[in-house]
Each structure stands twice: as structure tokens, then as C-alpha cells.
């Protein structure tokens, strides 16, 4: 593989939640390359969501560095971090977090309101939302339907389209397939990766479900990447 700069680097990162002395997340080094698909596996309480929050800059490491697309996250103010996240990271939440009364089209376009660079890359928002729906296997009629009226599998694909629109360099997914059976999960990942690979987007997904492993370029375990990851409940 040719040498390229990682899209994400964590270096000597340490994080503790206040009042949770037993949980101490320490990551010496983690690098994700452009276009890689990486699955991070870990049991409940191992710190997967904490890790995603550190990458997204919604929390800041107490020491060490989180560098996304060449930017040290801690060097940005809170509002700069919000803008940076919107432009550089497509998010697929566990519960999808769609606006149930808004149309699918509006849900997909939502991140562009906060992401100038992604908006500029898109051009015609309606046409791009339609293309993404088609490529993710959704019928054209869903574009104008309210998101809350769709099946779970359809909502998941809308959540993927919302993360993909405007081609952010990194997509972070928090167990987005957990509500679906194994065959649907596998189809979903195939569709997601076909889109992400077309733009060299890196996909990092966290899950407790090792059955997904063979579809990813790399599988990491929280117990391996963290020096002390403990499920302190
Ligand atoms: N907002 C918070 N405030 C205080 N402690 C928190 C907070 N979020 C997580 N923790 C604690 O951090 C530890 C790791 O939790 P985290 O949610 O990151 O794990 P996880 O691997 O994502 O778990 P799950 O798979 O159950 O979602 C737990 O001990 C948890 O109680």
C-alpha cells in the first residue's frame, strides 16, 4: 500500500469520566488510513462510545492527541470543533437519530446545514439525496416520505445516506446494524462500503458483534488498543 497520511491518529490519549475513577481509557497509538474499513469490538462498558466521543471532539482527552484529517482536535474551540465535525465526520448513530416528522430528503440534507465544505461538494442536494437512496437500495418514493414511517432497515439506509452526503473523509458508526438480522446487516455493510470506497472514505464502526468481522479490512479489540479498558459499571 502506498504511504499516505492517516485520516485519524490517536496518540498517548487518556480519558477518565469525572466520578468514575475505575474507568481509565488509555490508547498509546491508533491510526486509520484513508479508505480503510475498521471494526472496533468491545464488550459493554469497555469504552467504545467514549472513544467515539473523543474522535468526534464532543469530549477532549485529558492528555495526548486526537488528530483528524491533519487537525489536532484540542486546538479548536468548541464551536470550531462542531463545524469541523460536521465537515469531516459522517455519523451513523445506534438509534439512527432521524427526525421522524421530516422527509427522508430533508433528513439526508440535514448535516449540510452545518457543513460548508460538504455542502459545496454536493451541488444539487435533491439530486444527490436521490442518487444516494438509489445506490443504497431505497425506492424513489421514500424521498418524500416522513422518516418515521419507514422500516428499521430503511431508516438505517437513510442514516447511512445522511452520513455519506458531501463525502466526509471519515464515517463513524456506532453499532448501526444491531437492530437487524445477520443477512440484513451484511447487505447494509456491502452497500455502505460500496459508497465509501468510491470516495476513499474511511469507515470506523464500533460493535460488540464479532459476526461482522469478515467484511472489514481490519478488526481491532478494545482490550488490545487500550492499555486499561475496564467495564466499570
Ligand atoms: N457521560 C458519562 N458520564 C460518566 N461516565 C460515563 C459517561 N459515559 C460513559 N461513562 C462510563 O464510561 C465507561 C465506558 O462507557 P462507554 O459507554 O464508553 O462504553 P461502551 O463500550 O460504549 O458500552 P456499551 O457497549 O454498553 O454502549 C462506563 O463505565 C460508563 O459508565
Image: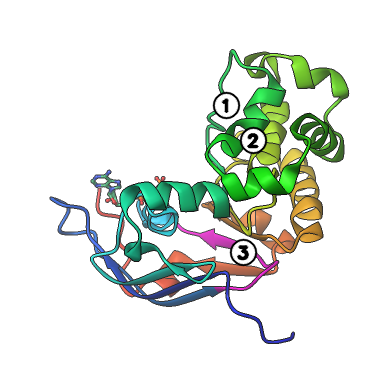
Residue at the (58%, 37%) spot, across then down: 111
Give the left or right position of residue 202, taking residue 197 as reference. Answer: left
Could you say which disc has been placed on residue 98 in the image?
Answer: 1
Left/right of residue 222 with respect to residue 211 in the rendered view: left
Residue under the image location 44 percent in, 65 percent down = 222
Question: How far across and down, in percent of the image, does residue 164 sit?
Answer: 69, 46
Residue 20: image location, x then y, percent: 17, 53
Where residue 81 appears, x then y in whole percent?
A: 40, 52
Report which residue position mark 2 lands on: 159
Residue 206 in percent (x, y) is at 53, 54
Q: Is residue 65 left or right of residue 134?
A: left
| Kind of element beneath mark 1 | loop
Q: Which residues are magenta?
A: 32-43
Which is nearer the eye, 208 or 115? 115
**Label 3, label 1: how many angstroms apart (C-alpha)?**
24 Å
Magenta-colored stretch includes residue 39: yes
Residue 112, above or below 39: above
Amino acid at each position: 500500500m502506498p504511504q499516505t497520511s492517516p485520516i485519524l491518529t490517536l496518540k498517548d490519549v487518556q480519558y477518565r469520566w469525572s466520578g468514575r475513577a475505575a474507568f481509565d481509557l488509555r490508547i498509546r497509538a491508533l491510526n486509520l488510513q484513508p479508505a480503510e474499513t475498521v471494526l472496533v469490538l468491545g464488550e459493554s462498558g469497555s469504552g467504545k462510545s467514549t472513544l467515539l466521543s473523543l474522535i468526534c471532539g464532543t469530549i477532549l482527552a485529558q492528555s495526548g492527541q486526537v488528530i483528524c484529517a491533519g487537525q489536532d482536535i484540542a486546538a479548536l474551540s468548541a464551536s470550531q470543533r462542531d463545524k469541523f465535525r460536521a465537515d469531516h465526520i459522517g455519523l451513523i448513530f445506534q438509534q439512527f437519530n432521524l427526525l421522524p416528522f421530516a422527509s427522508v430528503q430533508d433528513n439526508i440534507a440535514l448535516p449540510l446545514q452545518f457543513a460548508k465544505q460538504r455542502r459545496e461538494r454536493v451541488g444539487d442536494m435533491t439530486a444527490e439525496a436521490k442518487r444516494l437512496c438509489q445506490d443504497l437500495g431505497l425506492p424513489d418514493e421514500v424521498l418524500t416520505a416522513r422518516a418515521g414511517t419507514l422500516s428499521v432497515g430503511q431508516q438505517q439506509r437513510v442514516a447511512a445516506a445522511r452520513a455519506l452526503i458531501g463525502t466526509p473523509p471519515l464515517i463513524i458508526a456506532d453499532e448501526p446494524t444491531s437492530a437487524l438480522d445477520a443477512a440484513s446487516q451484511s447487505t447494509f455493510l456491502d452497500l455502505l462500503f460500496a459508497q465509501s470506497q468510491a470516495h476513499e472514505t474511511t469507515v470506523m464502526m464500533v460493535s460488540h458483534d464479532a459476526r461482522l468481522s469478515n467484511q472489514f479490512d481490519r478488526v481491532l479489540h478494545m482490550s488490545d488498543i487500550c492499555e486499561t479498558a475496564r467495564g466499570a459499571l
